[in-house]
Amino acid sequence: MRIRLAAIAILSIALAAMTSTSALAPAWAERDPAESSTCPASTASESAAPKGPPRGSPTLTDTFVPAATSAPQLWGGEGEPNGWIPEGTSLSTLGSSEERYCLGVPLEVQTWEQEQADRRGVRLAATYDYPSRIDWRDVDEKDWTTPIRHQGACGSCVAFGTTAAIESRLEIAMGDAELNPDLSEAQLFFCGSDSTCQAGWYPSAAMDFARDTGIVDEACYPYSDQDQACSPCLDWESRVVRLEDWVGLTDPADMKQTLADQGPFEATMLVYVDFYYYTGGVYKHEWGRLVGAHAVTVVGYDDDEGYWIVKNCWGEDFGEEGWFRIAYGDSGIDDYVYVPIVEQPVPSYHLYPSVTPLDSGTIVPEPSACVADGCDAGTELVLTAVPEDDYEFAGWSGEVSGSAESIQIVMDSDKVVTAIFTESSEADDFRCFLPFIAR
């Protein structure tokens, strides 16, 4: 821990030295540091790497963000999409005691993630087939993301980055872009951590909580951006969504493959002064001291232009209606990512039995739930044909065949089966005997 703290201290000193020269700051970024406001509310929502850094007492940085006072200029290139446009925003007026509430990842997390990224080896045996571009806001002409939300004046970004990734992956796993799950960031943050709005939290710990305890829906525990005791609804245990597991990735090719195959994941990034001025384009850090670290959700990428597509939790007024694009490798965005693994739903199939002639017999399935409720794919089902009086079983038709009264089938699809019965020969003999008695 001493080594890690020393490294952070050296990094902070170096960054302060690098940014202390006023010549590095554009003219429009000068302001009076005494001006401040709170993190504003919106006016308008795989090869695994080690699973997270050692978890101590989270600490965030304490710096200030200057505000824009003059016309913006284009940074990073001649124009879209190679550059981005800085402008004064509601976030760029934050002062030293407020800015950290828009973040929430301890700097030691980013330090650890960088160490993991530096250790990654060459993937000589890996085979990738991901496309050159994907954006889960528009796959098969459907939006598989959930609305942009706002963390407010609380360093709870880890909860928002985690829930946003899980919500999208639930929609993708269920094949339903209209599912729109709304998980509770409040329960994840205030019940899952021993932390506060000022201190922030660890993404790895949030993923562990989502796997081991689960996350309730927003209606069970609505979010508010202030420290509070854990207080979900009374029946919260019956309302949780749990992860099957999660993995960490350090190779960008692995990140793109899992993003294309299974959906969004959580990442962290370093936030510098200039990011608070972002209004559009492909962000690349150009100027400003380090403010802290932030958790976000990556929903796409573009290899032709070299950027990630990211969901933020600062409301729709930020960036590109709540979203932003960031260049590959910038600000630690792809050093290490947290990939939630949601349980893939097992298909359920139904049995549709019938008999002919009508009322000539019944079909008894075991287990019987496959008729009313459906049963999981792969369920072995025994069907028994039971004739009524004066009938005998003749055979099966539909998706099964044979003449045995009991047969076994495997439910790998919906099954339509018919049991065929015929009048028994004993019933025919009895009817022939009736006229003789009458005489």
Image: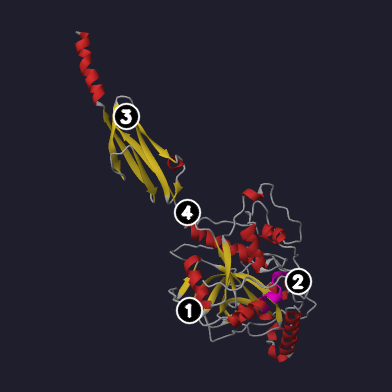
Front position in the image: 185 or 80:
185
**Gap in Å between the C-alphas at discs 3 and 4?**
36 Å
**Gap in Å between the C-alphas at discs 2 and 3?**
78 Å
Q: Position of residue 399 (x, y in %)?
A: 31, 45
Q: Which corner quadrant holds the N terminus?
A: bottom right
N-terminal-most mark, 3 or 4: 4
Q: Main secondary structure of the magenta part?
A: helix
Inspect the magenta stretch and tell me whether residue 53 lies in it: no
Q: Position of residue 48 (x, y in %)?
A: 56, 72
**Gap in Å between the C-alphas at discs 2 and 1?**
36 Å
Q: Nearer the viewer, mark 4 or mark 1?
A: 4
Front position in the image: 395 or 343:
395
Above or below: residue 423 compared with residue 64: above
Q: Nearer the viewer, mark 2 or mark 1?
A: 1
Residue 111 can be seen, yes or no:
yes
In the image, what residue type sits under mark 1? Asp
Above or below: residue 376 compared with residue 364: below
In the image, what residue type sits under mark 4? Val
Q: Residues within 10 Å of mark 1 (few under 14, many from 20)?
A: few
- Secondary element at tag 1: loop
The structure residue drawn at horizontal position 50% and vertical position 56%, both measured from the top left corner, is 178
The boundaries of the magenta stretch are 101-111
In the rendered structure, find residue 98 and report the number of the disc placed on it: 2
